[in-house]
Image: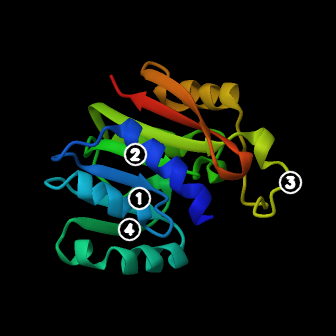
Amino acid sequence: MGLINHVPNMRAIELLDIAERDDVLEMGFGPGWALKRMAKLARAGTIIGVDRSPTMFRQAQSRNRRAIEDGKVKLIQGRFEQLPLETATFDKVLAVNVIYFCSSEGTALKEARRVLRRGGTMSIYVTDCSYMRGLQFIGPETKQTFDQRGLEDLLVNSAFGSDQIEIHPVWLPFGFRGLVARLCKV
């Protein structure tokens, strides 16, 4: 998974265009690779990650120990549908491979938009649904999958309807195709 997730993480982070003083939220930080990368980009900002998995929490904590000790990175074990964060706290929000597990009502996306500052940017990555069929890690916790139209519909209908939305294809190792959405809150 690490090899396949490297490309989506790097592309999604690139589209965020993180500045030195940005405050950044990662929803679903997994083992913490992207947190570490973003902490290097936002040297004078704060990086906060929220993930529901105790296993991922421990891995990310280990990988980012120094930045956590320095107060640069903060990890929270929690749910995306109820972010324990103040409104308009972040300049950038990253969500890679997480919205499959969120409800189709888009509650997690509404929460992401709530904590995003006006003029802020969110970057979301999903693997195109035609490439996900038959993958072994797709289980009952996967609530939805997306093609480009389905992703755009979810974003428009849930939270980001009045905002600027761009969706870019991403080719991954082993011939997989992904989609990265870049959303700018107006």
Q: Where is residue 146, by image quadrant?
A: top right
Upstream in the sequence, badge 3 or badge 1?
Answer: 1
Dividing the picture into quadrants, the one containing residue 13 is top left
Q: Earlier in the sequence, mark 4 or mark 1?
A: 1
Q: Is residue 89 above or below residue 141?
A: above
Find disc 4 in the rendering and name its residue.
76
Q: Earlier in the sequence, mark 3 or mark 2?
A: 2
Real-space CA distance between mark 1 and mark 2, rounded to the nearest whole angstrom: 8 Å
Tell me which amino acid carries mark 3: Gly
Percent position (x, y) of residue 132?
77, 48
Q: Identify which amino acid the numbered label 4 is placed on.
A: Ile
> Which residue was labeled with disc 1?
34
Q: Element under label 2?
A: helix
Residue 79 visible in the current orientation? yes
Residue with the mark numbered 2 = 13
Q: CA distance from mark 3 to mark 1?
A: 27 Å
Q: Depth check: 175 or 104 in front?
A: 175
Compute the Cα span from label 3 to label 2.
Answer: 28 Å
Check disc 2: other Cα within 10 Å, few if <14, some if 14-19, many if 20+: many
Q: Quadrant of the N terminus?
A: bottom right
Q: Residue 134 — which label?
A: 3
Amino acid marked by disc 2: Ile
Q: Secondary structure at mark 1?
A: helix
Alpha carbons under labels 2 and 4: distance apart: 20 Å
